[in-house]
């Protein structure tokens, strides 16, 4: 439905009413006015050989069709304290999913399928988690208590994630302010989803059980940019230990956003920190839009308690195949149902996100809760829908200000579908529903599930509490890397260009950069740009023939020093060294046609060059030295400091 | 006074007393590692005396070392009360009446999220709240006979159970379900098979391998399968109903005398040994695998022989066993010994004199096999023949635990060793079979291509 509306004017009009502006037009004031608040949960995999609660290897991945066996499970909610089911739990149970796990012998044992209790926690993982908690200046707990956190989507075969708090509180500095931490926990990673179609959801268990930490901030970021900055900082901090995994999926973010009058909404599984600003920007305005809808409904003076939808079965023959999937409906013997939403005129086409309207909120929930694959609805405020809504309106006895939907799918799912529609509409009266949403690359989000509360945690009766001794904390403190903010300060002092910081911190190259500068007494900015510009650029275009270790650059400078070569030759050698990590440095020099010359040999050609210049360009004497420098530079690089060469030239012999 | 410091001892208890902090109170704790705020939780009896447990606002629990505590203050107090809200179990005259007898295992439960406690559900109302599907199957009533862990089930409990079953049958029940911990379920199943003979209705034992507080628990599905079997099945025998595969697919009905727990933690841990299971059970469907079984009847006749001699032992033979093990059993007044021997039912020569001494002293000695599958054959090798000559009686293909239970049951009825021998070797409920079916012994080995193919195709 996206974008096409019966009254496109209503979509545009409502967008204006919400006050939506693109992110590049937004200022700090935009967000202050909205009451924007954002918190982060950064998930980071730890680099350990084995998984957290079993001895399976960590990081051995499979492809969706590569498996040795499958098992099937269902998740049943357990009653809460009040004898009621948790909202999320109930929703997942309503969906009645068959959950299939694909197992690979190499990366899963009976623990992954919940047929064996946990083994003692992986001590390497715990040490890394404590180290990162210390870097966050958190208070380390005296005793680790493994807790079960319920997940009913099937992403963990037990139905809960084993997790434990390592430290609470702490803080990180970002530009001009401090962001406080709530906690750092260590936990097992979940399964990777293969597919989720109708009532069948499939997972692979390769990633399941890998050690992970979750760093949670208070909702103290007041602009999307601050959120991204804090995200980067936390990632750099974790990487500074050199003991975390990198690569696709190794770090994932959950971002929660709220605005004044809105609700905390969690955007799950944000793959890149650079996506955070656009996602949070759009979410803030989505909440604003939902609050506008709430106001409109209030203005209509509808009695929410009495407000209800009505529905009727409709024959698919009344419509053409290009308006509804008529053939599918016939082939699968689907139900086709018309639904009347009384007094909801202009609500369904109301703007919620760029290219999306309120009808999408309903459609998303129909997919997740009622298992109706998209497209799953049409609505009477779409433009050029080609549907003759008068047929539907007549059957539903609709009044002028009512809106109609057409939905289709298996008969047995229709009850849930109607409940879902009614529920979402009722929630509109209250404003912004509590939910978790999935991020899309275009910066918009879709409904994922109802937001779970803290009421889904209970102790893991399979594990004993584990004391964290003072000695082990002291031992870890001694080996801790320097603070990221200190590293940033040092790089500024060295006058590194701003654009090299991210690369150096992301790849945890600061300790190496520092060592190279110190041991070989090199000009700091030269080393900084060599890494942050040259190396970054090379990494982006060249694939190394075997694994390239950054330590190789230390060896390079050590070689240059031994051979008494000038360090600037490193820039020329770098692409070859990166591409062929096993090639010895002598051969690299040969490859780039380097010839070893003494200073005298270089300077000896100056008189000849002067003559040549005069032949070519007698008139312009001022350019002479620059021209000679240009001729000599290739031969001088590595052999003679260029500054010295210039001085010799300029000294005028 | 002790109650408000639930589970705390030693230094931790002293710290709570010093700062006047009660369990369940909202506390603010200052420590050398930082500030912590949360609810003080009870501590498990077996945990150390050096930490205090706190539940944070985020729902997580953490422990605080007492030697790091600088100050503690109590801010509020709210004691937890464990109670499951009951919903009335709906009944209908069209549905069979089923009795659930409880022995102590947790069949269903709910969580107290404030404290993290798991609270068992047992009354029909509580069970209806946890597993509402039961109401579509039967009219359920429940009776808690005792609250013991599976490993503490013994002769006294077997006898109580047998008598309770008799009472239910006489009262006209349509089927009986027994909730039981899984560790010794097969012992109790064997005992009931001998003590409750020729019942007119199904007697179904059920438990769970994963506690019912977890979403992926097998408890609810096992209970649904067991209740359906008790309500609808034609098989009027003592059975164990547990997961067939580890997947949530179907349950298997195993004969009480041929079933054994075969894995310490798998859901599909119960297997029929030396035979095939009786049937498969799914929601609303029972598929018979065995054609011969005792059928459900309308009469209320049942023969109860609730007897048990406690001085019976099960001895797992190992190489280098010394005769004094057997001697000490005789000296301690044991009346019967079941041996799980090696291979076809063997022991080493040094124990022969002890065996001779035992049988002469009137101790009944029966031989079973620790291979579990297969019959005792004591005439194949000389060792076997020697032992038979010394009075050891081969117990055919009775499982060691079943032979142990049966010997206790037989000696509970008579001291006449000839009568005991007759009781032991006359099958009551398939504990001894005429032979072993070709498909009775199946232990697949992973890695073999055809087995891997099977595993990929079918849910284990």
Image (tube, rainbow, N blue to C red):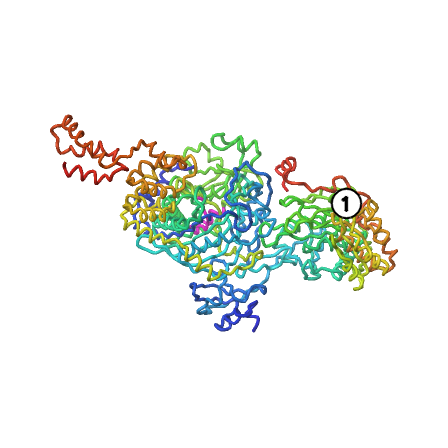
Q: Going by the image, does A493 lie left or right of B200?
A: left
| Secondary structure found at label 1 | loop
Q: Nearer the viewer, residue A423 or A60?
A: A60
Quadrant containing the N terminus of chain A in the rendered view: top left
Identify the subunit bearing mark 1: B
Residue B111, given in percent of the width and then of the height, sits at 57, 57
**Point 47% across, 63% down: residue:** B38
Q: Nearer the viewer, residue B399 or B182?
A: B399
Q: Going by the image, does A339 lie left or right of A235?
A: right
Residue A456, given in percent of the width and then of the height, sits at 52, 55
Residue B416, given in percent of the width and then of the height, sits at 87, 59
**Residue A298 appears in the figure:** no
Q: Which residues are magenta?
A: A422-438
Q: How many marks?
A: 1
Q: Going by the image, does B133 lie left or right of B326?
A: left
**Residue A128 appears in the figure:** yes
Q: Nearer the viewer, residue A34 or A301?
A: A34
B254 falls in the magenta region: no
């Amino acid at each position: 439905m996206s974008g096409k509306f019966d009254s496109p004017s209503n979509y545009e009009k409502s967008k204006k009413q919400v006050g939506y502006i693109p992110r590049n037009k937004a200022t700090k004031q935009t967000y202050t006015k909205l009451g924007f608040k954002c918190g982060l949960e950064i998930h980071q995999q730890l680099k350990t050989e084995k998984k957290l609660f079993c001895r399976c290897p960590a990081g051995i991945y499979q492809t969706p069709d590569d498996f040795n066996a499958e098992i099937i499970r269902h998740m049943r909610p357990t009653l809460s304290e009040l004898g009621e089911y948790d909202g999320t739990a109930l929703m997942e149970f309503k969906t009645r999913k068959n959950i299939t796990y694909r197992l690979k012998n190499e990366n899963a044992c009976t623990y992954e399928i919940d047929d064996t209790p946990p083994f003692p926690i992986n001590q390497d993982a715990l040490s890394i988690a404590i180290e990162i908690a210390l870097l966050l200046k958190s208070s380390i707990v005296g005793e680790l208590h493994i807790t079960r956190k319920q997940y009913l989507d099937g992403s963990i075969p037990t139905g809960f994630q084993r997790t434990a708090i390592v430290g609470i509180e702490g803080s990180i500095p970002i530009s001009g302010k401090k962001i406080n931490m709530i906690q750092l926990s260590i936990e097992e990673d979940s399964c990777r989803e293969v597919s989720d179609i109708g009532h069948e959801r499939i997972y692979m268990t390769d990633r399941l059980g890998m050690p992970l930490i979750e760093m949670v901030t208070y909702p103290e970021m007041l602009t999307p940019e601050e959120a991204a900055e804090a995200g980067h900082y936390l990632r750099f901090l974790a990487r500074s230990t050199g003991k975390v995994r990198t690569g696709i999926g190794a770090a994932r973010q959950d971002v929660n956003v709220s605005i004044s009058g809105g609700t905390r909404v969690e955007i799950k599984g944000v793959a890149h920190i650079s996506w955070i600003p656009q996602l949070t920007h759009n979410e803030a305005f989505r909440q604003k839009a939902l609050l506008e809808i709430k106001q409109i409904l209030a203005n209509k003076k509808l009695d929410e308690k009495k407000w209800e939808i009505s529905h009727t079965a409709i024959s698919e023959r009344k419509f053409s195949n290009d308006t509804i999937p008529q053939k599918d409906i016939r082939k699968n013997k689907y139900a086709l149902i018309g639904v009347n939403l009384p007094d909801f005129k202009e609500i369904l086409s109301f703007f919620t996100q760029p290219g999306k309207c309120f009808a999408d909120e309903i459609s998303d929930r129909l997919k997740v809760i009622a298992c109706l694959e998209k497209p799953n609805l049409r609505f009477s405020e779409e433009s050029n829908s080609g549907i003759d809504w008068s047929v539907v309106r007549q059957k539903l006895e609709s009044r002028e200000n009512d809106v109609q939907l057409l939905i289709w799918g298996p008969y047995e799912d229709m009850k849930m579908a109607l409940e879902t529609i009614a529920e979402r509409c009722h929630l509109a009266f209250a404003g912004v529903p509590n939910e978790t949403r999935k991020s899309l690359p275009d910066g918009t989000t879709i409904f994922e599930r109802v937001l779970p509360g803290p009421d889904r945690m209970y102790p893991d009766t399979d594990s004993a509490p584990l004391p964290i001794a003072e000695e082990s904390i002291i031992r870890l403190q001694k080996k801790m890397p320097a603070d990221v903010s200190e590293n940033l300060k040092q790089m500024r002092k060295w006058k590194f260009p701003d654009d090299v910081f991210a690369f150096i911190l992301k790849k945890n190259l600061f300790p190496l950069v520092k060592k190279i500068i110190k041991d070989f007494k090199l000009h700091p900015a030269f080393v900084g740009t060599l890494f942050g510009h040259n190396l970054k650029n090379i990494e982006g275009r060249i694939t190394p023939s075997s694994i390239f270790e950054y330590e190789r650059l230390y060896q390079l400078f050590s070689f240059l020093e031994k051979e008494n070569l000038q360090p600037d030759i490193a820039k020329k050698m770098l692409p070859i060294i990166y591409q062929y990590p096993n090639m010895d440095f002598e051969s690299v020099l040969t490859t780039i046609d380097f010839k070893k010359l003494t200073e005298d040999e270089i300077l000896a050609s100056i008189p000849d060059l002067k003559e040549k210049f005069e032949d070519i360009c007698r008139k312009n004497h001022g350019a002479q030295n620059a021209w000679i420098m240009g001729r000599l530079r290739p031969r001088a690089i590595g052999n003679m400091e260029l500054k010295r060469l210039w001085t010799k030239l300029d000294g005028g012999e | 006074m002790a109650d408000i410091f639930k589970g705390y001892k030693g230094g931790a208890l002293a710290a709570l007393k010093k700062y006047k902090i009660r369990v369940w109170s909202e506390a603010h704790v200052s420590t050398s590692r930082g500030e912590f705020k949360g609810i003080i939780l009870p501590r498990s009896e077996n945990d150390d005396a050096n930490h205090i447990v706190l539940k944070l606002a985020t729902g997580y629990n953490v422990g605080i070392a007492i030697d790091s505590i600088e100050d503690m203050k109590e801010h509020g107090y709210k004691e937890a009360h464990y109670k499951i809200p009951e919903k009335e179990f709906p009944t209908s005259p069209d549905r069979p009446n089923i009795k659930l007898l409880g022995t102590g295992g947790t069949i269903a439960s709910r969580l107290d999220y404030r404290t993290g406690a798991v609270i068992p559900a047992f009354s029909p109302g509580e069970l209806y709240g946890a597993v509402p599907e039961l109401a579509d199957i039967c009219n359920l009533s429940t009776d808690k006979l005792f609250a013991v862990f599976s490993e503490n089930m013994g002769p006294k409990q077997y006898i109580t159970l047998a008598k309770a079953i008799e009472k239910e049958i006489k009262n006209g029940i349509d089927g009986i379900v027994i909730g039981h911990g899984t560790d010794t379920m097969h012992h109790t199943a064997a005992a009931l098979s001998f003590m409750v003979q020729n019942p007119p209705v199904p007697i179904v034992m059920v438990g769970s391998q994963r506690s019912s507080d977890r979403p992926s628990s097998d408890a609810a599905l096992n209970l649904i399968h067991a209740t359906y079997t008790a309500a609808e099945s034609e098989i009027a025998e003592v059975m164990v109903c547990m997961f067939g595969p580890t997947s949530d697919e179907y349950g298997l009905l195993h004969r009480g005398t041929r079933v054994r727990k075969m894995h310490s933690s798998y859901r599909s841990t119960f297997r029929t040994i030396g035979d095939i299971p009786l049937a498969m059970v799914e929601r609303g469907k029972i598929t018979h695998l065995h054609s011969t079984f005792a059928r459900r009847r309308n009469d209320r006749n049942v023969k109860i022989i609730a007897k048990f001699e406690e001085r019976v032992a099960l001895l797992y033979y190992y190489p280098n066993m010394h005769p004094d093990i057997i001697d000490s059993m005789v000296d301690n007044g044991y009346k019967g010994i079941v041996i799980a021997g090696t291979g076809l039912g063997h022991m080493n020569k040094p124990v022969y004199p002890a065996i001779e001494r035992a049988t002469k002293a009137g101790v009944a000695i029966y031989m079973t096999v620790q291979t579990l599958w297969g019959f005792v054959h004591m005439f194949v090798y000389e060792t076997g023949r020697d032992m038979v000559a010394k009075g050891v009686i081969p117990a055919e293909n009775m499982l060691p635990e079943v032979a142990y239970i049966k010997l206790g049951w037989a000696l509970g009825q008579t001291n006449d060793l000839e009568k005991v021998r007759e009781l032991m070797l006359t099958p009551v409920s398939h504990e001894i079979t005429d032979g072993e079916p070709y498909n009775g012994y199946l232990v697949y080995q992973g890695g073999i291509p055809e087995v891997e193919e099977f595993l990929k195709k079918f849910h284990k």
